[in-house]
């Protein structure tokens, strides 16, 4: 991965760009164009949203960690539910109040919260405090612990629906696409999906992104694209939702 993100505190500007390169050869597929070329992933920090989906152990947190590390000069807060993030440049906390104290002095940097208290209250407060401050990229890991298809904490919803004018980007990570509130996907410009097993998850994702996502299942389980090869480990399907075609890639 490489990154061309300069520092930025003005939410109205949109010059942030993050380029992710594919390191390895990608599987051949007939319907996904541009496979084998560099992934065209240009993320505008403090503006756009990302959703990362996939089964447990498929590579979601690893990708999000790589995205965080590439965001030089951009303030990032990570809600690290399962202690999966690390970076020599990030400050690590287990108590949100302590993290806020240091952030409010520094007003910039990469902050990882691995909460001792992984409760709804901590997650809610994390979202609310981020909203108050603005100009942040938030990485929210394992959000399926805090929402269902029908219900979503209002502080999280506020970030998704009203965060953009405050310069807030949200990167939402979940292993259960079908239990993700519709708002999350429909407001994400960038969607990464790793291997998935449940037909209900694939059906939901296909209804939103098209039938190419069936390649995320093992070939014998797919309802469509059964002839396409199985995806290599840690491979994702990426879609910029402003375009019609997806790409296959790997960090
Ligand atoms: N692209 C990759 N290359 C090498 N190892 C990876 C890659 N992606 C994930 N891993 C490893 O696989 C394991 C599971 O990845 P992780 O991102 O934690 O999965 P998830 O967050 O989807 O549960 C971790 O040990 C991680 O280091
Ligand atoms: Mg994870």
Image (cartoon, rainbow, N blue to C red):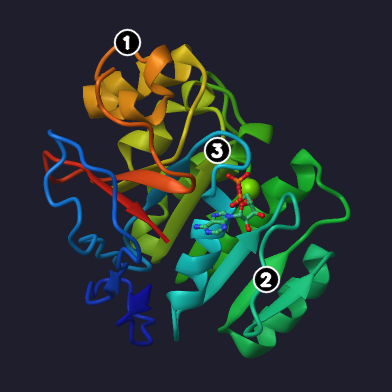
Q: Which residue is mark 3?
A: 174
Q: Bin the neighbour count of mark 2 within 10 Å (Cα to Cα): few under 14, some 14-19, many 20 and up.
A: some
Q: Residue at x 34, y 60 (%)?
A: 165
Q: Is mark 3 within 8 Å of ligand 2?
A: no
Q: Look at the image and tell me whether residue 141 can be seen.
A: yes
Q: Residue at x 28, y 17 (%)?
A: 226
Could you give the CA–CA distance between mark 2 and mark 3, rounded to whole angstroms? Answer: 19 Å
Whether residue 57 sits left or right of residue 48 in the image: it is: right
Q: Is residue 141 above or below residue 16?
A: above
Q: Position of residue 112 (x, y in %)?
A: 68, 68
Within 10 Å of disc 3 (Cα), the crowding (few <14, some 14-19, many 20+) is: many
Labels 2 and 1: the sequence-earlier one: 2
Q: Residue furthest right?
A: 116
Q: Position of residue 225 (x, y in %)?
A: 24, 20
Picture quarter containing residue 175?
top right
First along the sequence among labels 2 and 3 = 2
Give the residue drawn at x 72%, y 50%: 81
Up-down: is 218 above or below 188? above
Tell me the number on the disc at residue 133: none
* Along the line of sight, the residue nearer the viewer: 162 or 185: 185
Relative side of 17 to 135, left or right: left
State the residue position of label 1. Answer: 223
Q: Is mark 2 within 8 Å of ligand 1?
A: no
- Tag 2 secondary structure: loop
- Say if mark 2 contacts mark 1, CB within 8 Å: no
**Residue labelled with disc 2:** 86
Q: What is the spatial separation of the Cα atoms under label 1 and label 3, in whole angstroms?
A: 23 Å
Residue occupying the point 87% across, 50% down: 117
Above or below 234: residue 168: below
* Quadrant assignment, res 92: bottom right
């Amino acid at each position: 991965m490489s990154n061309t993100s300069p520092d930025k505190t003005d939410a109205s500007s949109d010059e942030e760009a993050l380029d992710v390169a594919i390191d390895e050869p990608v599987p051949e597929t007939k319907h996904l164009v541009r496979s084998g070329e560099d992934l065209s992933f240009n993320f505008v920090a403090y503006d756009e949203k990302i959703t990362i989906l996939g089964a447990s152990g498929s590579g979601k947190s690893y990708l999000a960690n790589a995205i965080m590390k590439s965001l030089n000069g951009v303030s990032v807060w990570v809600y690290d539910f399962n202690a999966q993030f690390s970076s020599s440049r990030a400050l690590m906390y287990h108590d949100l109040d302590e993290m806020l104290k240091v952030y409010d002095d520094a007003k910039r940097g990469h902050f990882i919260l691995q909460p001792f208290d992984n409760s709804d209250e901590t997650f809610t407060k994390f979202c609310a405090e981020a909203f108050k401050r603005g100009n942040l990229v938030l990485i929210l890991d394992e959000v399926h612990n805090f929402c269902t298809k029908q219900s979503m904490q209002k502080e999280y919803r506020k970030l998704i629906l009203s965060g953009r004018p405050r310069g807030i980007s949200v990167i939402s990570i979940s292993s259960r696409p079908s239990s993700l509130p519709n708002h999350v996907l429909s407001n994400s410009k960038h969607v990464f999906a790793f291997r998935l097993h449940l037909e209900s998850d694939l059906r939901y994702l296909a209804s939103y992104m098209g039938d190419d996502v069936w390649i995320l299942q093992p070939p014998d389980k797919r309802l469509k694209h059964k002839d396409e090869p199985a995806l290599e480990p840690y491979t994702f399907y990426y879609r910029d939702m402003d375009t019609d075609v997806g790409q296959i890639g790997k960090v």
